[in-house]
Image: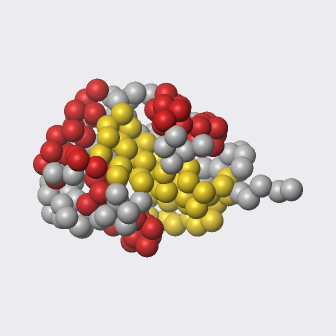
Amino acid sequence: MRVIAGSARRLLLKAPDGMDTRPTADRVKESLFNMLNPDLYGCAFLDLFSGSGAIGIEALSRGAQRAVLVDASMECAGIIKQNLEVTKLGENAEIINEDVYAAIERLGRRGDKFDIIFMDPPYAAGYYVPVMEAIKKADILAAEGYIVAESAKGVDFTAAEGFKIFKERKCGPAVMNFLNLEEEKC
């Protein structure tokens, strides 16, 4: 696994051992960042279920102003820290080592807003809708911001009240679902 482009291009990243994480393949990551590229420079980026930190680090390497990387695993938080040191991108990054819901609540209390929120939870664990509801409740998505949810085919996002899919792209075995907040109706 490596950083594909930007200031840390070609640097190798560590990944946690075992089957608990599913690193995004380079081919999928490249497709994702081709779609994100117009919105990336200078943005605030939130990487939920960060694993190795590869997505948040790629965002920083390509010009995101700051990135917050969230993972509940102590092992993953340690790997993220090492990967930020290797890439020299730690100055603009924050690692939050806690449950995703607690992290979202903390970010909301601080008044943080994110232009792009990326989430790649375990596909079958049922996180998508509850996490999106937590994001909305904490009010951490910027007005013009959006969520990118990596999922398997067939995940139903319609139960996430207040969000709409505005783009969906198949990237290998994964589907990138782009969602933003629906406009409030009077």
Front-lying residue, 170 or 108: 108
Work out whether residue 20 can be spotted: yes
Q: Kindly give the residue lying farthest to the front in the view shown.
A: 111
In the picture provided, is 57 more to the left or to the right than 33? left
Q: How many numbered marks have been drawn onto this rendered protein structure?
A: 0
The answer to which quarter of the image holds residue 98 is top left
Q: Name the image colouring.
A: secondary structure
Give the x, y percent position of residue 145.
Answer: 55, 58
Tell me the residue at 48%/56% (across/down).
116
In the picture provided, is 16 more to the left or to the right than 37? left
Q: Is residue 17 above or below residue 144?
A: above
The answer to which quarter of the image holds residue 186 is bottom right
Give the x, y percent position of residue 49.
Answer: 41, 40
Tell me the residue at 28%/26% (across/down).
74
Q: Is residue 126 above or below residue 53?
A: above
Tell me the residue at 51%/48% (across/down).
113
Work out whether residue 25 can be spotted: no
Tell me the residue at 21%/38% (across/down).
81
In the picture provided, is 170 more to the left or to the right than 73? right
Give the x, y percent position of residue 1.
Answer: 21, 54
The answer to which quarter of the image holds residue 51 is top left
Front-lying residue, 53 or 112: 112
Front-lying residue, 69 or 79: 69
